[in-house]
Image (cartoon, rainbow, N blue to C red):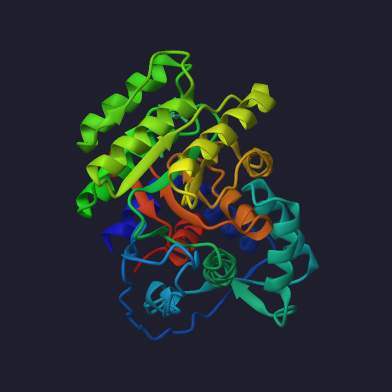
Amino acid sequence: MAFFSKLKDKLFKSSSKLDEGLEAIVEDGGEETAAVAVESVAVEQPVPAVVEVEAAPVAEDKAPVEAPKSGIFARLTGQNQSGPVVKRVLDDDMLEQLEELLIASDMGVDTALRVTANIAEGRLGRRVSSQEIKEILATEVARIMETVARPMPLYPSKPQVVLVVGVNGSGKTTTIGKLASQFRSAGKSVVIAAGDTFRAAAVEQLQVWGERAGVPVLTAPEGSDPASLAYDAMTKAEAEGADLLMIDTAGRLQNRQDLMEELSKIVRVIRKKNPDAPHNTLLVLDATTGQNAISQVETFQKLADVSGLVMTKLDGTAKGGILVSLADKIGLPIHAIGVGEQIDDLQPFDPEEFAAALIGLDQK
Ligand SMILES: Nc1nc2c(ncn2[C@@H]2O[C@H](COP(=O)(O)OP(=O)(O)OP(=O)(O)O)[C@@H](O)[C@H]2O)c(=O)[nH]1
């Protein structure tokens, strides 16, 4: 419960935009009707984790199949409505308005069209209230997101190497700090390598996060070879029997060729120590960049073998729909979302909670 409220509060900007937009669409051309009583069904949801706690074998490299979750909307709609309700006939005009609203929330044109087509299916001509259309939309969004919501897999390999990539300012350092703290809380030993050796400020910031998380941060002189630091970090993590090695990397997309060479050299060097490394390549994306996140994913997929995403800065953005677009178009696993600048502001990605928060469905 607390988890949901926090997410909804933090996604306030997105939800208020979609929430108000949907209400305005139903009001526009809707008519008052007598309310129908709805039976309340309370279903408690388990809170998922950012990382898998159970180890999975490296060779299989498959995310575990999660049991389907019971409907959150039964819980969300657990109320007896009273008083007249405005309903509008779901017709082409209304669908067009819905499409525009979804595009404005950064869902992207293709995804917005697909979502509205699914909403229309079997419902054209029916009269719907704003609460009903929110529930239908939330179900559609959750359905798309379910295929990508997966905690970061943990493997028995010691150390499990996690390469963290993304453009400057996307939140790599902060995410590494938050993840390191969560791993530590789960009883894992962690080593961090400050692989963006070209920016002294980036290294210092990572050291601050390392201190907060209680995790050692390996650094190298400014301008030195990040691959050599990664090799030394691998040696240290192996010697110490660390569970995880997280490697920060530079994010200078301005010089793509250099960055590609730098990343592939890091991978080459750590594979000398463990041919299966890196076990995860996390791409950190800033949600406030909206549709631009799609092209960042495509670029980084060419630079590195991206295995999963972390979406930061979902607090205070009206662009939460980009996650739906990413799930629909790219389909990479979304391991976690950043909802603030504090160490505990990294949350597991739960499709139903996210959909409800994005659309502004009230929790009753
Ligand atoms: N509101 C909010 N701010 C965040 C979040 N994640 C990161 N930030 C902020 O975003 C800014 C950039 O984050 P960094 O972690 O430094 O990003 P980076 O990708 O490491 O950037 P460089 O160090 O420039 O490579 C910082 O001011 C962070 O506090 C988040 O989930 N929510």
- Point out residue 76 in the picture as x, y percentages from the top left corner: 40, 72
Q: Residue placed at 62% from the left, 41% from the top?
A: 293
State whether residue 297 is above or below residue 348. Answer: above
Q: Quadrant of the C terminus?
A: bottom left
What is the total number of numbered labels drawn onto the structure image?
A: 0
- Point out residue 329 in the picture as x, y percentages from the top left corner: 68, 56
Q: Quadrant of the N terminus?
A: bottom left
State whether residue 149 is above or below residue 108. Answer: below
Q: Residue furthest front?
A: 272
Q: Residue furthest right?
A: 92
- Point out residue 212 in the picture as x, y percentages from the top left corner: 22, 33
Q: Residue placed at 48% from the left, 65% from the top?
A: 59
Image-based side of 163 in relation to 183, left or right: right
Image-based side of 9 in relation to 292, left or right: left
Ligand 1 shown in quarter:
top left
Q: In the rendered image, is residue 360 in sight?
A: yes
Where is residue 291, by image quadrant?
Answer: top right
Where is residue 139, by image quadrant?
Answer: bottom right
Q: In the rendered image, is residue 342 in sight?
A: no
Image-based side of 201 in relation to 303, left or right: left
Q: Residue placed at 74% from the left, 78% from the top?
A: 124
